[in-house]
Image (spheres, rainbow, N blue to C red):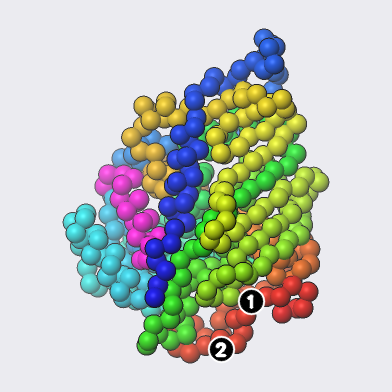
Amino acid sequence: MSKDNKITRREFLSYSAVAGVAGALGFSPLLSSCGNSKKTAYVPLKAPGEYYIPELPDKAADGKELKAGVIGCGGRGSGAAENFLAAANGVTITALGDVFDDRLQGLKNTLKDKYQIEVADDKCFTGFDAYKNVIDSGVDVVIIATPPFFRPEHFKYATEKGVHSFLEKPICVDPEGYRTVMAAAKQAQAKGLCVITGTQRHHQRPYVESYKKVQEGLIGEITGGNVYWNQPMLWYRNREQGWSDMEWMIRDWVNWKWLSGDHIVEQHVHNIDVFNWFSGYKPKRATAFGSRQRRVTGDQYDNFSVDFEYDNGVHMHSMCRQIDGCDSNVSEFIQGTKGSWSSTDFAIRDLQGNIVWQYDSATEDAAHQQNDPYTLEHVNWISCIRNNTPIVQAEETATSNMCAIMGRESAYTGKSVSWDEMTASPLNLTPAKMELGPMDMSIYTVPVPGTGK
């Protein structure tokens, strides 16, 4: 029996984001604290123009028609396809690709029934090489939403062909994939392409406005932080009769580390990325532990706790958990020399705990009809393409991805892991054979720290 009624990543994120924004009370950007009528002097971390702030209108800029291909037609691929269509006028989907035909047909039918978009049969491709056929079909842009393991090669091919990419996160699961993404990102920059990734907090207005205030110096120099993604167990799929080893693993992909990277990479990368984004720091070392407690399928852990040490001596604590019956928390907290910021209420507090700024959700609701960050990331992507404004987020996201990989490998081995050794590591999770058929399942075991296994 499938456990498809479990909470999804997207539902949980949406719930936590709405809960946080709903608490915003519209405080003035600068309030006096402790009865002191003098405003605090803030020293910006970066000057305006030194950091990127996306424009987030309800709809993307009008312009030339864009034909999109979707690679990976499951839940996230289907969702991203609908986000793309909602983001702009004059956009359509003309090609679909997936390993499995039933997944492809599901999205094909949705496009026809809901949007009156009929994707021609000769533009529908299945199998492990479907991505090449989609990219070569004449599309302008491609939405890459396969299980994470496949994304580096798909991005590389799209970039070689000069096609703009939307990459769902995470965008790699091992150092080999990281290096592939970094090289492709450099090529995309050289070609003037537009590449947006699915770290949707970068297009979520409360986060963007909070980021601006942190860069303006409202919390001072960043000295540390804590990031969390603790939630109930995610979905899983039991093996069905007739499924080969490979088919079962791909259909149950979120529970297998070679496909998803483990949940610290697949899911918790969002929170790690927020700290890296706000601080501009890159860790030099990770020391972690984790365990498997109640997971039903796959070879992953249920929880991780990681101490990230950054180049300037700052430490950030990261924790994630997917276990039923435990407290949930999806948020980020950043401490500075003058105060702190938290995404639980999108507020900045001084060192005495007084709120000096808080995101005004009422103003957002009055000014905008589109507040879904999953759609707004496509709004920005399409606007950048139509305005001929190159943007490549892949390198930034790959850096946060590598942080999560460092934490995973430290927990798996029981040893501290450095940035330099991890980025140069030969670790490659690619199976011996990439085909629908039997696999050596004996190698997919749960890691035991301190044993080398």
Give the residue pinned by disc 2: 440
Image quarter hosting the C terminus? bottom right
Residue 57: image x %, image y %?
Answer: 38, 35
Q: Are marks 1 and 2 in contact (CB under 8 Å)?
A: no
Residue 28: image x %, image y %?
Answer: 54, 19
Is residue 168 visible in the rendered image? The answer is yes
Image point (76%, 47%), residue name: 315
Residue 142: image x %, image y %?
Answer: 39, 60
What range of the chain is rendered magenta?
Answer: 73-90
Q: Distance between the residues labelled 1 and 2?
A: 15 Å
Q: Residue 178 versus residue 81: which sits nearer the camera?
A: 81
Image point (49%, 25%), residue name: 25
Label 1 residue SS: loop
Q: Is the magenta stretch mostly helix, strand or loop?
A: helix
Depth check, mark 1 against mark 2: the one in front is: 1
Q: Residue 155 versus residue 44: which sits nearer the camera?
A: 44
Tell me which amino acid carries mark 2: Asp
Instruction: Work out whether 439 lies above or below 23.
Output: below
Give the residue pinned by disc 1: 446
Q: In this view, does 214 lie to the left or right of 201?
A: right
Does residue 336 show up magenta in the picture? no
Mark 1 or mark 2, earlier in chain: 2
Q: Is residue 169 left or right of residue 47?
A: left
Image quarter hosting the N terminus? bottom left
Tell me which amino acid carries mark 1: Val
